[in-house]
C-alpha cells in the first residue's frame, strides 16, 4: 500500500507550522465483512483465550485503507496536512463493519 504523503496527527496543530486555513472535514472509510474461516478460528480461540490474529489483521488493513482514503481526500481539497484525526467503527449489516478515519484538512503559512 503506498500512502499519500500527508502529515497527520491527532493533535490540533503540526509542530513548527502555522495553520492559515482550515479547509474541510476529510474522511476515508472501508467496509469489511467477516470471513467464515476466521469465524471458525475465532470460535476455537474464544474457548481457550488469546488474540484472534485473523481479525487483528483485518482491522489493521481496514484502518490502513481508511487512512489512505482520508489522506487522498485531503489532497483532493488542497490540504497539506490533516489534524484532529480520529477513528470510528460501526456495524453496517450482519457480519459487516465500517472503519472510518476523519480529521480536518489544513493549509500552512507559505
Image: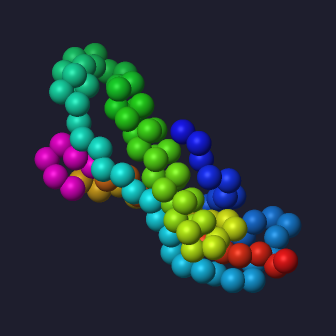
Place of residue 7 in the rendered image (x, y in percent of width and height, measured from the top left): 69, 58
Name the residue furthest bottom: 21
Place of residue 99 in the rendered image (x, y in percent of width and height, measured from the top left): 37, 52
Q: Residue sitting at 16 percent across and 52 percent down? A: 93
83 versus 1 height, above or below: below
Place of residue 25 in the rendered image (x, y in percent of width and height, measured from the top left): 51, 75
Q: Residue sitting at 50 percent across and 69 percent down? A: 26
7 horizontally vs 69: left or right: right
Q: Residue sitting at 77 percent across and 75 percent down? A: 108
- The number of discs equals 0
Please provide the residue range marked out in magenta. 92-97
Quadrant into which the N terminus falls: top right
57 versus 81 height, above or below: above
Please say whether residue 89 is visible from this viewpoint.
yes
Can residue 95 be found in the magenta stretch? yes
Colour scheme used in the picture?
A: rainbow
Can residue 51 be found in the magenta stretch? no
Place of residue 64 in the rendered image (x, y in percent of width and height, measured from the top left): 50, 45
4 horizontally vs 95: left or right: right
Amino acid at each position: 500500500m503506498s500512502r499519500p504523503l500527508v502529515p497527520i496527527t491527532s493533535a490540533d496543530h503540526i509542530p513548527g507550522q502555522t495553520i492559515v486555513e482550515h479547509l474541510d472535514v476529510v474522511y476515508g472509510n472501508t467496509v469489511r465483512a467477516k470471513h467464515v474461516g476466521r469465524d471458525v478460528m475465532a470460535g476455537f480461540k474464544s474457548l481457550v483465550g488469546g488474540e484472534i490474529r485473523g481479525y487483528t489483521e483485518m482491522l489493521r488493513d481496514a484502518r490502513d485503507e481508511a487512512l489512505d482514503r482520508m489522506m487522498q481526500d485531503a489532497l483532493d481539497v488542497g490540504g497539506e496536512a490533516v489534524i484532529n484525526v480520529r477513528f470510528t467503527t460501526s456495524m453496517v449489516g450482519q457480519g459487516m463493519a465500517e472503519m472510518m478515519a476523519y480529521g480536518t484538512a489544513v493549509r500552512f503559512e507559505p
